[in-house]
Amino acid sequence: MKVGDLIKIVQSKRDALHSHFDGQVGIIVRKTLGNDAVADWYDVLTRDRILYIRADYLEVINESR
């Protein structure tokens, strides 16, 4: 995943935690360094806010060029 990709927020296969943002669509605006050594973290711009989300909760819908 990279900045500009169109994504959908999904349920992680790694965690049992459920996000109330499931199904929302957004654009990756920044890759950030998280404290989690297992997955990357991204700032995602949705319709009304910017969310800080781990990569395993994201599914790419359309890659940017």
Image (tube, rainbow, N blue to C red):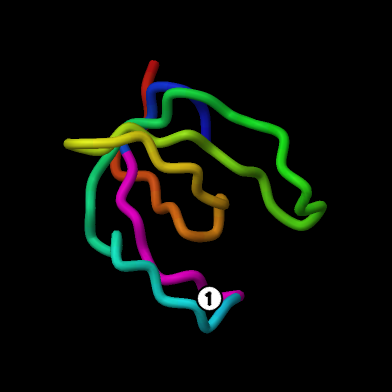
Identify which residue is drawn at 41% across, 71% down: 11
- Which segment is the magenta one? 7-14
Residue extending farthest to the bottom is 16
Q: Badge 1 is on which residue?
A: 13
Residue extending farthest to the right is 37
Image quarter in which the C terminus is found: top left
Residue 5: x and y in percent read 38, 30
Identify which residue is drawn at 50% across, 49% down: 53
Assess disc 1: are there few (<14), some (14-19) or many (≥20) residues with their C-alpha within 10 Å of its C-alpha: few
Kind of residue at disc 1: Lys
Identify which residue is drawn at 78% across, 48% down: 35
As drawn, 60 above or below 3: below
Residue extending farthest to the front is 49
For residue 7, what is the image quadrant? top left
Q: Does residue 8 show up magenta in the picture?
A: yes
Residue extending farthest to the top is 65
| Along the line of sight, the residue nearer the viewer: 4 or 45 | 45
Residue 8: x and y in percent read 30, 51
Q: Does residue 64 show up magenta in the picture?
A: no
Residue 33: x and y in percent read 72, 34
